[in-house]
Amino acid sequence: MFKWRDSFSVNIKSIDSQHKELFKTGNLLFEVVDIKDDVDRYDEIIEALQNLRDYAVYHFGYEEKLMKENGYPDFEKHKKQHDAFIKKISSIDEEDVDEKQQKIGMDLIIFIANWIENHILKTDMAYKDFLNQKGIY
Ligand SMILES: [Fe+2]
Ligand SMILES: [Fe+2]
């Protein structure tokens, strides 16, 4: 299960609440994969995938705009990671989801866990002081 902690905060209110949405999607997937019955979970996994696509559009767009407007020096490196996320999510074929629900669900959970660990807690955290010093909270 994905649990938000205060230490995950980048001290910018709007961004923290966007990051929390990713935790929600992770938990949605977790519930789906965790139930060991034979009920079809196609719709839930597609919903989670759609959430991840929406997240990429509004959240990455939001962060990139803030970084750009404020002249954040590591913008390009940061954006590359966002692009890799988008590439990964778009590489998942919805027809595959039907046959391999459990596997794709698990795969996405691991992907989100790694993203939190390596992107939110490292790459995003790296702009925290920079943007805070620009008066963005
Ligand atoms: Fe982020
Ligand atoms: Fe980011």
Image (cartoon, rainbow, N blue to C red):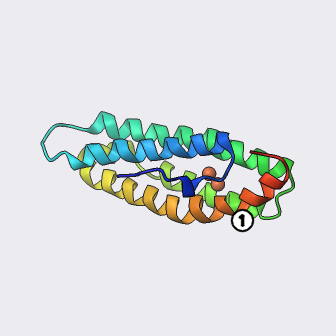
Q: Horizontally, is 15 left or right of 1 in the view? A: right
Q: Where, by quadrant of the figure, is residue 81 drawn?
A: bottom right
Q: Is mark 1 within 8 Å of ligand 2?
A: no
108 relative to 22 in the view: left or right: left
Which residue is outermost to the front?
6
Kindly identify the residue that appears in the image at 79 percent across and 53 percent down: 131
Residue 114 in the image: above or below residue 34:
below
Residue closest to the eye, 89 or 59 = 59
Report x, y in % for residue 38: 12, 42
Three-letter code for the amino acid on which mark 1 is drawn: Lys
Q: Which residue is mark 1?
A: 77
Please tell me which residue is depicted at 50% across the width and 56% down the height of the picture.
88
Q: Secondary structure at mark 1?
A: helix
Task: Please tell me which residue is depicted at 55% across the width and 66% down the height of the picture.
Answer: 118
Q: Position of residue 109 (x, y in %)?
A: 37, 55
Locate the C terminus by quadrant.
top right
Relative side of 87 to 50, left or right: right
> Which image quadrant is residue 85 in?
bottom right
Residue 66 picture location, percent across and down: 78, 46
Residue 9 % position (x, y):
60, 52
Mark 1, other Cα within 10 Å: few <14 / some 14–19 / many ≥20: few
Left or right: residue 22 versus residue 101 is right
Q: Is residue 28 above or below residue 114?
A: above
Residue situated in front as seen by the camera: 54 or 67: 67
User: Could you tell me how many numbered marks the image carries?
Assistant: 1
Query: Quadrant location of residue 71?
Result: bottom right
The residue under the point 46% across, 37% down is 50
